Amino acid sequence: MVKVALIPGEEFREKLSYVVIAARHNGGWLFVRHRRRGGWEMPAGHPDAGESSVEAAVRELIEETGAIDFVMETVSYYSVDAGKGKQYGRLFLAEVERLGDLTDHEEIEGLKVFRRRPRNLSLPEVMSFLFRVARRHGGSLKV
């Protein structure tokens, strides 16, 4: 069983393994189909060495969706424990005004706007939890 939990507060000192971006576009939510995992998921990835979580989130959103015009805000830090110790991530919310062409991406084979959370998720426990958090968070993002 996978346990996912939010971590309250602004100050966080653990090493982040993930950034996940809940991205709204044209009244729906952007999900990408991951080649290896086969299901739908929110754009996500690992921060590169020396890269901040914000820089990683911007890079991943652009790489995985082709987003051109967008605004983004942080939502929360979170932890995931799949039985091998906790790993940490940061959830972001983005409002994407315009998408460009999605170039051939080695990890992503599709991009789609969903009005609701898709049923065929990769990493379902994590993606479902983070999607609910982002949807509740809402925010007042405007491009």
Image (tube, helix red, strand yellow):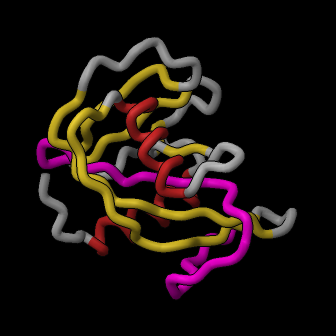
Q: Relative to residue 110, is residue 78 depicted above or below?
A: below
Q: Relative to residue 41, is residue 92 depicted above or below?
A: below
- Frontmost residue, 19 versus 119: 19
Residue 4 drawn in magenta: yes
Give the residue displayed 47% in from the left and 39% down from the top: 59
Residue 28 placement, left or right of 122: left
Q: Relative to residue 94, is residue 100 depicted above or below?
A: above
Whether residue 1 is visible, yes or no, is no
Image position, residue 96 (x, y; %): 22, 44
Residue 4 placement, left or right of 121: right
Image position, residue 28 (x, y; %): 20, 47
Instruction: Tell me where the magenta segment starts and ends, as one range.
Output: 1-28
Specify the quadrant that holds the N terminus. bottom right
Instruction: Kindly give the residue lying farthest to the right in the view shown.
Output: 84
Residue 138 placement, left or right of 106: left
Image position, residue 50 (x, y; %): 67, 49
Image position, residue 18 (x, y; %): 62, 54
Give the residue displayed 33% in from the left and 28% down from the top: 66
Q: Relative to residue 9, is residue 132 depicted above or below?
A: above
Instruction: Kindly give the residue lying farthest to the bottom in the view shown.
Output: 9
